[in-house]
Amino acid sequence: MEAAEDQHKDSGGSSVISYLEIVDVQSGERTVIAEFQALIEAPNWLKDGNKLIYNRQGRLYAFDITTRESKEIDSGFAVHCNNDHVLSPDHAHIAVSHHTREDGKSRIYVLPTSGGRPELITPLGPSYLHGWSPDGSTLVYCAERGGQYDIYTIPATGGLEVQLTDTPGLDDGPEYSPDGRHIWFNSVRTGLMQVWRMNADGSEQTQMTFDESNNWFPHVSPDGETVAYLTYRKGDVAPGDHPANRNVEIRLMPSSGGEFRTLVQLFGGQGTINVNSWSPDGKRLAFVSYRIV
């Protein structure tokens, strides 16, 4: 839920190489489709199945999987975007979390995916976007209000925000299920960061993972059957932190609950899968891994 440029440098000032990868969710086969001598983060998959959107140094880029070329998306004044960006259901628009000039806090804006002027949605900051309802009407996000981070919704065209969680401790990473009935999120309320699910109105908040790890950013597959999420080992990080430069896993679990399986082990963390990166056909995931040089 933040910009991560500084997190990817060690105390000696070393820099990062980013690998944009795709993994087959059945076989686990990984394919590096691009290497960047810079920090990139958080790929979204476009509906055509051939393009990915990622952020780099505050700006958004569209990557063509066939040509292996990137093109900057014109985001107007929103040039301090972090890794919390989400596409509308029809992919005509993208919502971004941009750190505004007046106070440096992240606020949510919406602009055309092809580029254009951003429109402010959340006047209050900090607000970190994570999900867009399947009917296109509502955004769901993590926000700090009065010193506490909770889950909120707001109309996608702006309006009054609605608070859905109020349990002490960080709640983050909210995302709608494809049928719009549930919001998945991660919460530290039980001591470790775990994956949770609630009804779209905030009721029936239910813990879905119970292992001795810290689990972040649940992303539901297009068919609603599988949830991918990022796992840090217990003891590697504080439960409420999701830093860069750690040995982490991408895990899969049934959306009904049950046993997980590890899909990928990698060096990453912050920036790897902050937003939903399932392919439209549900057969692949895009993610970013890193190497410090």
Image (cartoon, helix red, strand yellow):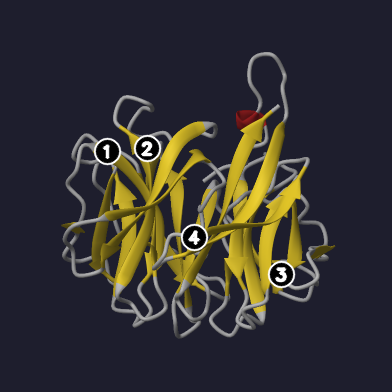
Residue 216 versus residue 119: which sits nearer the camera?
216
Please tell me how crowded label 4 is: few (under 14), some (14-19), or many (20+) other residues with Cα within 10 Å: few
**What distance separates the C-alpha of mark 4 from that of mark 1?**
24 Å
Point out the tag, 2 or 1, that comes first from the N-terminus. Answer: 1
Do we see residue 244 in this rendering? yes
- What residue sits 25% from the left and 69% below the top? 255
Q: Which residue, given by chain and number where applicable, does mark 3 sit on?
A: 65
Q: Position of residue 179 (x, y in %)?
A: 34, 83
**Element type at mark 3:** loop
Q: Which residue, given by chain and number where applicable, does mark 2 sit on?
A: 232
Vertical relation: 158 (above or below) 163? below
Q: Which residue, given by chain and number where applicable, does mark 4 sit on?
A: 29
Q: Position of residue 243 (x, y in %)?
A: 50, 33
**What distance separates the C-alpha of mark 2 from that of mark 4?**
21 Å
Q: Disc 2 or disc 4, which is closer to the eye?
A: 4
Q: Pick the quarter of the image with the C terminus.
A: top right
**What distance separates the C-alpha of mark 3 from that of mark 4?**
17 Å
